[in-house]
């Protein structure tokens, strides 16, 4: 049968798999088995021990590899397990460039854990290709990228960074959590490994902690497979199944959430009390043109800055619909405060260098009716104006 080229939305639902072959079950079975009987003394079957491989996890790993157009997929116990395992491809004496405004957990791993193993790092503003190129050292082995970045939504030119990396024999690792394979495929642009906190949009229901990684070529895939097996931070069969189910609806969920995000961003940008809005779907965003070139959508996450901590606290205290929580990418809208949540691992000085002020809030649009969210924002912003002690031009 000829293979028909399919849209990515169809691949999320079906991919290369059509149910379970022996029974025809539409959903992938959950293989809750730690070990597998071997029929032969001399030749083992494809699975022997679930740390090394599990059929449910394999179905997930095959699916994410297909969606990202890579060679090998890997399911990890969390996004940080995926990131940590990929960074463990480096060796003592190596150096890695990391985007300045990186997720707080990645910042902590790089600055506190990697240095214990004599792996050096430099944080670089990767929106500036010249600065990135000049930061390369003789022992630089990898460049770690987030685009859009968390939480200030800065955009890195992936093609430009890949050119710099190849010219200096470096690997490129890209966190693609915000965009997912629906909107961005870094491997197609030359990156070596793409990473996801699958807890977020890929799962979409605030019920799974998971991480995914995909390598572009076979040899790198074999190296990461060895680390995954040795390090052992694998995703269990139950969570693999739940993640496969969540991924089936990503196309519909992310499109609606992204449309809602654009409406909310336009509302906030026009509000007198909001100082800044960070969203790559705004034509005024410095990385707008680059993002349009390398991505198919602006996504469902944005950040906005209020005058101070008192204003941010009052907004959080009065807003009613969003969940105030760590995380993003779910069917429910999630509001978070990077200073004490996603980027609590950074000192105040380091946060402020990156534009993470005490008035910054991050919002992930869910599937609620947009008019309800705007009405909720409106009353919460009014309360924030009252409590912040800051006069606006309309006061």
Image (cartoon, grey):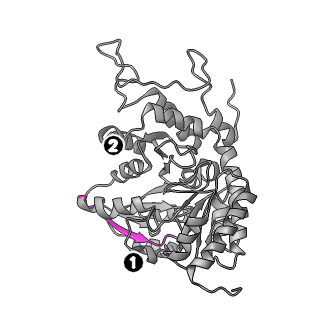
The foreground one among 203 and 45 is 203
Secondary structure category for the residue under label 2: helix
The foreground one among 385 and 111 is 385
Q: Which residue is drawn at 40% across and 30% down?
A: 53
Asked if residue 97 is positioned above or below residue 235 in the image, the reply reads below
Residue 176 in percent (x, y) is at: 53, 54
**Is residue 331 visible in the rendered structure shown here?**
yes
Which residue, given by chain and number where applicable, does mark 1 sit on? 349
Crowdedness near tag 1: few (<14), some (14–19) or many (≥20) residues, C-alpha within 10 Å: few
Q: Residue at x 58, y 15 (%)?
A: 23
Is 314 on the left or on the right of 368, as rendered?
left
Residue 75 in percent (x, y) is at: 45, 40
The image quarter in which residue 291 lies: bottom right
The foreground one among 41 and 376 is 376
**Is residue 140 visible in the rendered structure shown here?**
no
Image quadrant holding the C terminus, namely bottom right
Residue 1 in percent (x, y) is at: 68, 23
Asked if residue 216 is positioned above or below residue 58 in the image, the reply reads below
Q: What span is in magenta?
A: 117-126
Circle count: 2
Which residue, given by chain and number where applicable, does mark 2 sit on? 227
Looking at marks 2 and 1 on the same chain, the residue that comes earlier in the sequence is marked by 2
Q: Do the residues labelled 2 and 1 touch (CB within 8 Å)?
A: no
Residue 312 in percent (x, y) is at: 55, 72
């Amino acid at each position: 049968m000829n293979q028909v080229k399919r849209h990515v939305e169809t691949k999320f639902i079906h991919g290369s798999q059509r149910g379970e072959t022996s029974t025809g079950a539409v959903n992938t079975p959950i293989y809750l088995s730690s070990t597998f009987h071997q029929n032969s003394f001399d030749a083992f079957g494809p699975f022997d021990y679930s740390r090394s491989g599990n059929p449910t996890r394999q179905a997930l790993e095959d699916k994410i590899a297909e969606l990202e157009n890579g060679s090998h997929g890997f399911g990890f116990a969390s996004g940080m397990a995926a990131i940590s395992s990929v960074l463990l491809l480096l060796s003592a004496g190596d150096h890695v460039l990391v985007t300045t405004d990186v997720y707080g957990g990645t910042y902590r791993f790089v600055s506190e854990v990697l240095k214990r193993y004599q792996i050096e790092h430099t944080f670089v503003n990767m929106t500036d290709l010249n600065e990135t190129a000049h930061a390369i050292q003789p022992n630089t082995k990898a460049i770690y990228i987030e685009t859009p970045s968390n939480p200030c939504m800065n955009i890195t030119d992936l093609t430009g960074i890949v050119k710099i990396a190849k010219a200096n024999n470096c690997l490129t690792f890209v966190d693609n959590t915000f965009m997912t394979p629906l909107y961005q495929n870094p491997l197609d642009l030359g990156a070596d490994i793409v990473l996801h906190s699958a807890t977020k949009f890929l799962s979409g229901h605030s019920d799974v902690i998971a991480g995914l990684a995909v390598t572009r070529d076979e040899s790198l895939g074999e190296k990461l497979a060895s680390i995954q097996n040795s390090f052992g931070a694998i995703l269990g069969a139950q969570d693999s199944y739940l993640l496969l189910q969540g991924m089936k609806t990503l196309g519909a969920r992310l499109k609606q959430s992204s449309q809602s995000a654009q409406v909310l961003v336009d509302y906030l940008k026009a509000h007198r009390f909001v100082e800044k809005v960070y969203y790559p779907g705004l034509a005024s965003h410095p990385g707008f043109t680059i993002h349009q070139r390398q991505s198919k959508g602006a996504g469902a996450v944005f950040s906005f800055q209020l005058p101070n901590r008192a204003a941010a606290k009052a907004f959080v205290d009065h807003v009613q619909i969003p969940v105030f929580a760590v995380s993003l990418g779910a069917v429910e809208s999630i509001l978070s405060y990077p200073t004490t949540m996603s980027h609590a691992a950074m000192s105040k000085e380091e946060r402020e260098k990156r534009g993470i002020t005490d008035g910054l809030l991050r919002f992930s649009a869910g599937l609620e009716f947009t008019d309800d969210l705007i009405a909720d924002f409106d009353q919460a912003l009014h309360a924030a104006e009252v409590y912040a002690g800051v006069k606006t031009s309309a006061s």
